[in-house]
Image (spheres, rainbow, N blue to C red):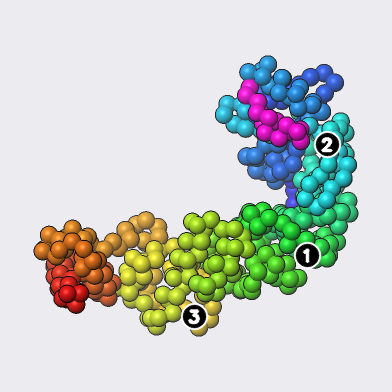
Amino acid sequence: MSTLDPEGPRRLLAQPEIRRVLAALAVPGEETRLVGGCVRDALLGGAGSDIDLTTTLLPEATMARAAAAGLKAVPTGYDHGTVTVVASGRPFEVTTLREDIETDGRHAVVRFGRDFARDAERRDFTINALSLRADGAVADTTGGLDDLAAGRVRFIGEAATRIAEDALRILRFFRFHARFGRGAPDETGLRACVAAQGAIEGLSRERVRTELLKLLLAPGAVEAVAVMERTGILARLLRGPADVGRLARLVAARPGADEMARLAALALHAESDIDRLQDALRLSKTEAAALSGSAAARASLSAPATIDPGAMRGLIACHDAGPIADALAAAGEGERPDIAPDARALLDAVEAGLVPRPAFPLTGADLVARGVPPGPTVGQGLAAARARWLADGCPDDASAVETLLAHGVSAAGEGSGRTR
């Protein structure tokens, strides 16, 4: 059991912008509370960044009260009862209490209500259904306080019903367990997720991507992903095999590795996997490029048996320090090359920003200034000079640069002769 922070909710309520919003919505006979993740996080000692509120006020009343208090109000989800109130540039989502009438797994038909307990029953997990009154009292009608203290992620009511309302809750179950849970996942919830996993196929890949990448950054990501792999859920998300051991090695050695490095360790086996992952998770071009960089860095380490400082400079010049360090950390037994201590120190220094990444010292203008005519031969000369530079350990002294320039001019001349 963990000890919850009893002062956390009061610190949350002390934030000036929150006080302004609550004051603006204070109406006799009505009530507005903070709800969900911000209350949960405050009880765990966090500051609470995304603040959600729920209210008995109807949306039009929320808009009017906010405007009367000099706050900006935007009807971001007006038909569903949500108004975004902005205080000192900070947005707060304020949603009228709701009750579900029916759901189809993706959309809910709701009506506005006045019962905070019934509104809490619409939420996914008990730890996300806590609400905070303006007087600092935490309201808990689902057992969320005990679950939060125990490190237990538990569905509200029937797990199968909650999942039928939105299949994304399968992924959220594992993500929240990876972030807040301790020990094995709740057995009832796990069984329901496994039984309903076919519903994942009906989810938008963008929603799947968002949940999976958040999960991979959670403290218990490796353990949660291992359960997902064992139950077949992970294969549905990735549409291919996974290597949980590689992810575990990366996280153990580099706990600050970002989500794309973690996804690469988990699911990227070859360059050809990138297209599959991009389609399965609707990755952006930038994210796909990060995977490509990870694949190239990993492939580059399979060639040399020993990496000395010169070879390390070449690797860093080609792939940057981060991807090289990630690839080394994730590599399994027999995959890691021997690295000289001074080469490792160089890698660490470049990643820490203490030493600059080696930069190729020539440009096309340098070759043109030496008489190489503009055109394809300049590129051929630069490519030859760069290959020589990498082979020589990325030197940057004046003598080495002059040698590289002469080599590039010579190669450009040979290329020009071949094309005539």
For label 1, the residue is 198
**Disc 1 to disc 3, C-alpha distance:** 36 Å
Q: Magenta residues, as a range?
A: 71-85
Within 10 Å of the Cα at label 1, are there few (<14), some (14-19), or many (20+) other Cα atoms?
A: few
| Residue 114 in the image, given as x and y percentages of width and height | 86, 31
Q: Quadrant of the C terminus?
A: bottom left
Three-letter amino acid code of the residue under disc 3: Glu
Residue 98's tag is 2
Three-letter amino acid code of the residue under disc 2: Arg
What kind of secondary structure does the magenta stretch mostly adopt? strand
Point 59% across, 63% down: residue: 279
Point 58% across, 65% down: residue: 277
Point 75% across, 33% down: residue: 79
**Disc 2 to disc 1, C-alpha distance:** 29 Å
Dots 2 and 3: beta carbons under 8 Å?
no
Numbered disc in front, either 2 or 3: 2
Q: Quadrant of the N terminus?
A: bottom right
**Apparent side of residue 413 relative to residue 149 in the rendered image (left or right):** left
Q: Is residue 407 above or below residue 155?
A: below
Residue 387 picture quarter: bottom left
| Residue 169 in the image, given as x and y percentages of width and height | 76, 54
Q: Is residue 200 above or below residue 419?
A: above
Q: Secondary structure at mark 3?
A: loop
For label 3, the residue is 335
Three-letter amino acid code of the residue under disc 1: Gly
